[in-house]
Image (cartoon, rainbow, N blue to C red):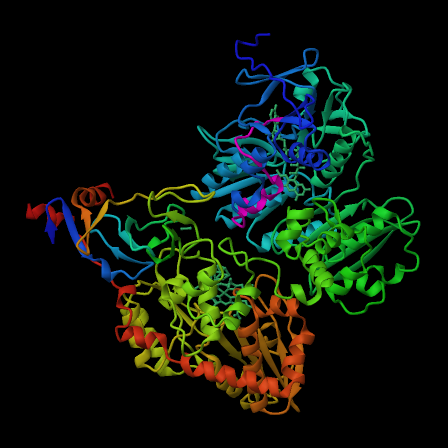
Amino acid sequence: MDFQGRTTVDEIDEGPGGAAREHLVVIGNGMAGCRAIEEVLARDAGRFRVTIFGAEPHVNYNRIMLSPVLAGEKTFDQIVINDDAWYADNAIELIASDPVVSVDRVAKIVTARSGRSVHYDRLLIATGSDPFIIPVPGKDLPGVISFRDMNDVDAMLAAADKGGDAVVIGGGLLGLEAAHGLTLRGMKVTVLHLMPTLMERQLDEAAGWLLKSELERRGQTVLTGADTAEIVGETCVEGVRLKDGRLIPASLVVMAVGIRPSTGLAREAGLAVGRGIQVDDHMVTSDPSVLAVGECVEHDGLVYGLVAPLWEMCRALADGLVGQPTGYRGSVTSTKLKVSGIDVFSAGDFSGGDGAEDIVLRDASRGVYKRVIVKDDRIVGAVLYGDTADGGWYFDLLKKQEDIADLRDLLIFGQAFALGGGASDPKAAVAALSDDAEICGCNGVSKGQVVASITGGACSLDAVRATCKASASCGSCTGLVENLLALTLGDEVKAGPKTMCKCTSFTHGDVRREIVEQGLRSIPEVMQALHWSTPDGCSSCRPALNYYLLCALPGEYVDDQQSRFVNERMHANIQKDGTYSVVPRMWGGLTNPRELRAIADVVEKFNAPMVKVTGGQRLDIFGIRKEDLPAVWADLNAAGMVSGHAYGKSLRTVKTCVGSEWCRFGTQDSTGLGVQIERMTWGSWMPHKFKIAVSGCPRNCAEATIKDFGIVCVDSGYELHVGGNGGIKVRATDFLCKVATEQQAMDYCAAFTQLYREDAWYLERTAPWIERVGLDYIKARIVDDEVGREALTSRFLFSQSFSQDDPWAARAAGAEREQHAHLGEFRPIEILAAE
Amino acid sequence: MMTGDWIDIGAVAEIPLRGARTVPVAGGEEIALFRTGDDRIFALVNRCPHKHGPLSQGIIHGHAVACPLHNWRISLETGEALGEDKGCVPTVPVRVDAGRILIARLTLLATAIAA
Ligand code: SRM
Ligand SMILES: Cc1cc2nc3c(=O)[nH]c(=O)nc-3n(C[C@H](O)[C@H](O)[C@H](O)COP(=O)(O)OP(=O)(O)OC[C@H]3O[C@@H](n4cnc5c(N)ncnc54)[C@H](O)[C@@H]3O)c2cc1C
Ligand code: SF4
Ligand code: FES
C-alpha cells in the first residue's frame, strides 16, 4: 500500500494475553468520542488498541464549559476532561490538528489531511456538529465567528479586548451564553433573534419574556423578530443590516443560529445518512465495522444537540463493543441556561395541545414563573423560570411517567410541599428523591450512583466528580451533590468538600480547624504544616489564610500586607484606570456641614473628577492617584472622618432611616441605634463584606431585610434579621428573634458577627453561609445558648479592641509610605542632555 | 545616579518581599519592579496586557503576579499571561548589584521614545 507515500503501516500489536488487539480508530476527539473510549476502557481496558484523530489542536475538553470560559468564570485548564496523561496512561494515540479527510471502507483505511493513513478494525465516527452559517452577504468577513470550539472563544476574546459593539445572531441557548460572556467582557451586545420570543424551542412565551427583560436589565439589547439581510463591512465586519433596513453597528458578529450534524465524511464513505449518520440501538452504522456516536448520528429519526443523550449512547456503544449489548432507546432531554444569576429550566413538551392542561404559578415579586404541563395525569412538560430547584423532580416524574393525580393540587409548589415536607429544606428535598432520580443531567448520573460513590469513599465534591462524574460538567447540580454528601456522610462532610485552591488538598473548613487545633501562627507555618504544593500560595489562598489567622489570633497576628487584595492594601477601591476612590465613614448615614465642607475641599484640591452618593448612604470621591491618597486622608481626618472600609472584607455601612426622632411612624430611635452599632462594629475584618441596617418601623426604609444583619424596630422592641443579600443573588433575611432593648440588639449583633467571623469560609457572605449551615444552627448558637452568645459577644469586642484604629490616620502619618510613593523617577530627556 | 550602561534606581530593601514598587518614566510607560518570595527582582512595564491594570498592585506569588483588576496571572520572567489568557507585557532588563537595583539605560530610553 502506498498512500501519497506517507502510509504508516500498522504494526501488529499484542494484548496482555498475547492475542492481537483489534485497532479501534476514532474520528473526533470531542465529548462523545472520548467518552465512548472511557466507557470501553472501563469495561475491558486491554481489548482495543486505540487511535484518535482530532481536528482541534487540544486534548479532550468539556465543550459545554466554553460558555463559562468566555464569561471569564473558568480557564481552559479547568475544562479539560482528559489531559495528556490520560492518553499516555491508556496507550491511546492522539493525532491532533489533523482532520480525517477520507474513509476507505473496503481497505479499512482512514486518511487524514496530512496524508497520514491508518488501518482500522473498528471505526468510530464522532465528528459532532458544524455550526450553521446563514447564507447572507458578508458572512465570510473577518469578525464573523461561530461558537463551537476553543478557537472561536479565543477569537471572541481577542475581539472583546478591543471593546466596542457585538451582535449575536440567534437567541437560543448558545447565542445567549455568548451574549452573556461578551457582555461580561465589556462589549455592548445586541442579540438578534428571528422568532418573537427567546429560546422558543425550550421556553414558552412567558418565560421567554421574563428572560428578555432580565437580559435587557443587564444592559443587552434584544431584538426579536429580527431578520438579518446582510453583514456589512469593507475589510472586516462593521455592522449587520436587518431586512427592515435597520443597521446595527458591530465589530464582532457571532452566528449562533443552530448546528447541523457533521456527516460529510460518512456520506462520502457511502454510509447511510439521513439528517445524521444512521445508527441502530448499538450505535452501529450501515457498515458493521463502523460505529458512530454523538451529535453526528441519527437514532430512530432523531438527532440530539445536548450531552445527556450522548452519554447514554456511549454506554450502549461500549456494551455492544465488548459483547454485552444493552441497546440505546432514545432520550428525553431537559435544558438549563448557563448564565449566572438567571435560572431557567425546561423539559419535555410544553406546546400545550389536545387534552393538555397547564398548571401555572407566577410570583412577580420574586420573579418566578413555573408551568407544568399535564396530560392524562402524567407530566409531559415543565418550564421553570427564576426558581428551578424542582426541575429535577418534575423531570424525574416526567421520564417515569408517574401518575400524579394525588399530587396534582400541590404539584406546582414543588416537591417539598407536594410530598408533605412543608419546609423548603433542600436536604429534605434531596432525601425525598428516588434512587434513580437523575442528579446530573450532563453526565446522566442518578442519585443512587452518587450515593454509591460516596459510600464507596468519595467524601468530597472533587472525589464525587472524579468517581461518578456527577457535577463534573456544567456544575449546575453541585448543590444537589453537596446535599447528598451531607446526607450520606452526616457531620463528616460539614467542613465542606471543596478544596481551598489548587495549592492544597484541604478545604476551607479543614484549614480553619487545623489553624486553631495545631495553633498555627503564620502563613508560612500553615503552608508547611498543611503541605502546600506551591512555594508561597496563590492569590486565592493567601488572602484567606491571612484572614483566618487574623481571626484566630486577635492582637497577636501581624497582618501580611502582601497577602491582601489591592483594595485592602491601599485602603481604597482601585478603579479601571488605576486610580482610587475614597469613601469616608458617615456614621449611620449622618453627616454635618464640617464633613461636607471637608469633602468638597478635597474634591476641589485634588481635582477629583467625580463625587457620588453611594448606595450605602455616604459619599464616594473618585479618581484619586495612589500618591495623593495619604494627603486626601489627612484632610478628611482633620475634619474628624475615618476610613469607610468601602474596600474591605469588613463592616461596610450601617444604613439607617430617620426613625422615631422625626418620622411620624417611627417606633424607636433607629438612627441612634445604627450609629451605636456602627461605632461598635467598624474596622472589623470578616470573611466577606458585611452590611447592617436599622429601620424604625416595619415599613423598613433602610432595607434591613436584605442586609447581613438587619434590625426592624417595632413598638415592643427590636426584630433581628440575618443573612440577607441585595447583590448578585438577592436573598431576604431570615428572622432570628426579637429582643426588648437596644443593648440586647447590640449584643446579639456582636455575637452573630463573631459567629460569622469564626465559622464562615473566606469570601462566603452570610447568605450562602446560612444556607450551608442552616438557620437552626445559628439560632442554637445565638438565641438558645445564652452562655455561648455572651462568649461570642465578648470575643468580638476583644478582637475589636485591636482593629478600631483608623488605617487612614496611620498612612497619613507616613506609615507604609512605600505603598504610595514611587521608588524613583526617570527623566530620559535629562539623561540625554547630560551626555 | 548613573553607572555606565546601567542606571541605579534604588535599593532592593526598599521593595517589600512579595511586593512591588513603581518607577514612572517621563514621556514613557511606567515600570514596575517586583521582589519575589525567593528574593529575586523582576521588572515589567506596569501595564496589564488585558485592560491595562497596574500590575505593581497585584498579589505576587511564585514568579508571577495576579493583576489587581481581573486577576490575570502574568509571568514575571517573560511578561506572558499564564493559563488560558493570552497577552504579553514587555519585560525590562534589570540587574542587582550589591543590593542596588539597576536598569539598562538603553531600554529605559527606548521605553520613553517608544511611548
Ligand atoms: C460605590 C458603590 C456603588 C454606588 O455608587 O453606590 C459600590 C461600588 C462597588 N461595589 Fe457594590 N457598591 C455599593 C453598594 C452596593 C450595594 C447596596 C448596599 O450596600 O446597600 C450592594 C447590594 C447589597 C449587598 O451587598 O447585599 C452592592 C453589591 C455589590 C456586590 C455583590 C455582592 C454579593 O454578595 O452579591 C459586589 C461584588 C463583590 O463584593 O464581590 C460589589 C462590588 C463593588 C465594587 C467594590 C466593585 C469592585 O470590586 O471594584 C465597587 C467599588 C466601586 C468603588 O470604587 O467605590 N457590590 N454594592 C456602593 C458603595 C456603598 C458604600 O457606601 O460603601
Ligand atoms: C458553547 C457551547 C455550550 C454548550 N452547552 C451545553 C449545555 O449546557 N448542555 C448540553 O447538554 N450541551 C451543551 N452543548 C452541546 C454539547 O457541547 C454537544 O452536545 C457535545 O459536545 C457533542 O459531542 P460530540 O462529541 O458529538 O461533538 P464535539 O464535542 O463537537 O466533538 C466532535 C469533535 O470532532 C472533531 N472533528 C470533526 N470532524 C473531524 C474530522 N473529520 N477529523 C477529526 N476530527 C473531527 C471536531 O473538531 C470536534 O472536536 C454546548 C455546546 C457549545 C458549543
Ligand atoms: S459599582 Fe457595583 S453595580 Fe456598578 S458597575 Fe461597579 S460593581 Fe457593578
Ligand atoms: S487588566 Fe489585568 S487582568 Fe484585566
Taking depth in this image into account, of A632 and A483 the one nearest to the observer is A483
Q: Residue furthest front?
A: A18
- Quadrant where the N terminus of chain A sits is top right
The quadrant of the image that shows the C terminus of chain A is top left
- Is residue A414 in view? no
- Residue A549 versus residue A578 in the image, above or below: below
Residue A416 lies left or right of residue A816; in this view the side is right
In the shown orientation, is residue A121 left or right of residue A157?
Answer: right
The number of callouts visible is: 0
Where residue A24 sits, quadrant-wise, is top right
Seen as rendered, the residue at the extreme top is A1
Where is residue A252 drawn, in percent x and y? 50, 37
Q: Nearest the camera: A292 or A94?
A: A94
> Residue A724: percent from the left, percent from the top?
61, 71
Q: Nearer the viewer, residue A148 or A664?
A: A148
Rendered residue at 38%/67% (across/down): A560
State the image quarter where residue A41 is shown.
top right
State the residue lying farthest toward the left.
A835
Residue drawn at x 68%, y 21% as measured from the top left: A20
Residue lying at 60% horizontally and 21% vertically, measured from the top left: A100
Query: Does residue A298 sit above or below A417 in this rendering?
Result: above
Relative horizontal placement of residue A51, taking residue B35 as reference (left or right): right
- Span colored in magenta: A51-74
Q: Is residue A376 visible?
A: yes
- Residue A70 painted magenta: yes
- The reply to whether the magenta stretch includes residue A131 is no
Between residue A558 and residue A385, name the one nearer to us: A558
The image shows residue A292 at horizontal and vertical percentages of 72, 26
